[in-house]
Image (spheres, rainbow, N blue to C red):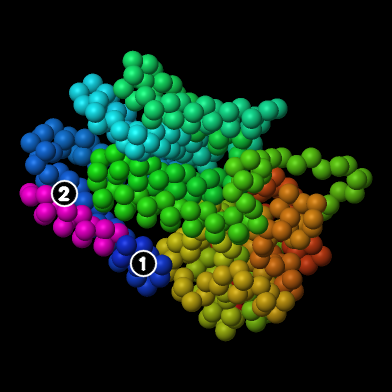
Amino acid sequence: MSRYAVETAYLLSTAFFILSLHWMSDPKTARRGVFGGVAAMLVAVLATWAKPEVARFWWVAWPILLAIIPGIWLAMVPLTAVPQRTAFSHAFGGLAAGLVGTAKYAYWYAHEPEMLTGFRMLAIVVEIILGYLTFTGSLIAAGKLQEIKWIPQRPWVYHGQKLVNLGALALALILGVVLMMYPASAAAPWLFALVIILSLNFGWMLVMPIGGADMPTVISILNSYAGLSAVAMGFVLDNKLLITAGALDGSSGLILSIIMCKAMNRSFFNVLFGAFGQVQQTAATGEQKMYKPETIEGAAQVLEQANLVVIVPGYGMAVAQAQHKVRELYDQLKKRGISCKFAIHPVAGRMPGHMNVVLAEAEIPYDDLVEMDSINPDMPQADVCLVIGANDVVNPAARHSGSPISGMPIIDADRAKTVFAIKRSKNPGFAGIDNELYFGEHTYMLFGDAKAVVGDLVKQFSGGGLH
């Protein structure tokens, strides 16, 4: 394929990437957006493979074919594992960028040292630092989300940690500047290897002090890093498509990070260095808060008498795979003329849109999914608020200045006339603090697996006791 044909294919691929993001912004066209992104990547890979300098290396096909196996495996994970799968994908992207930068530097150093200009070295240094730190950082993030035993969920901190982390990054940047000035010197390969080691080390050191509550935001920030490393790789390889695709990836990750930080009333600095999610030590007051349990029969009777029911889904619902039972409960309520809405917090689950996707799997009408800012004014008119596996996003403690989640926007579940909270255990949420909602005057607990509890509620409506 001629160079002009390749560039034309790259232009087509770029257009599909942009259209894919545009289509993904609306549920009605989201499926088209997925296929658009797949088409864009397919065109990009085939066009690159068809380049004259690449096509003659037939063995390039083997890595592509081998990559299909883990690709299919990653695509088959359950919806509850999408956040950690996303982190895992970022790890691969960061590693790819780092390895390409390493290989390109090694080749130019050995065969074409005149190619190691200051600009190219700047691009390579940015590529390897961002690529390798994204690799190790994303692996740790995925491990925290997967709750691997030897990776602590809570922040792993020690005295002077911030100085050590920033010092490692600063040293890598200083060595990078030295490499830009003397890219072909005898000591340059050793300095290059040291930059790689520092970057790999900085990645895991950056994420380990961050608690599980902030992992979704960390993933989106690492997504930005992966995109920026791809941009740098594009400059190194003189590939315009990589620059464009990387810029789209980096900017979308940045926008997502901003949305999530706003939803939690946090800043980037606070996420990266605030140790949010650390277990909070509460002072003994002599007053022990008590839950008020409710029976399935009692909860079903109250639900049947309601005019407006607001359901707040959370990660616990997704883990229990209760969305289909929730749909059955939704159908029973609608059949009785009861208005039923779903209140969606921007960071419900573990990523923005996570709950939307889980509920869409159960074919719950998208029109009944209401964003937090739109549903909150209606919460005082809600006869029942049914909280299913949600915790920090409905915690009234966010309204208090002394709370670790102070200022975080929440769904005003406590302002409903009656609250039923389905929870597997009495353990706190990601923030590591008790949920004041569960001890409220009008809150009643339904302890148990979300799928089983909602299933029992459905039985009460469909023939087990209510008519």
Mark 1 is on which residue type? His
State the residue at coordinates (67%, 77%).
377
State the residue at coordinates (74%, 71%).
415
Looking at the rendering, the stretch of residues picked out in magenta corresponds to 1-17
Query: Residue 399 placed where, x, y %?
Result: 76, 61
Residue 439 visible, this angle:
no
Query: Residue 242 placed where, x, y %?
Result: 29, 48
Query: Residue 218 placed where, x, y %?
Result: 53, 45
Task: Confirm or deny contact between disc 2 and disc 1 (CB under 8 A).
Answer: no
Observer-nearest of 244 and 462: 244
State the residue at coordinates (61%, 35%).
209
Relative to 308, is 91 on the left or the right? left
Which quadrant of the structure image shows residue 119? top left
Does residue 203 sit above or below 446 in this rendering?
above
Relative to 330, is 156 on the left or the right? right
Say whether residue 164 is magenta: no
Residue 414 visible, this angle:
yes
| View extreme (top): residue | 186
Label drawn at residue 46: 2
Q: Quadrant of the C terminus?
A: bottom right
Observer-nearest of 223 and 431: 223
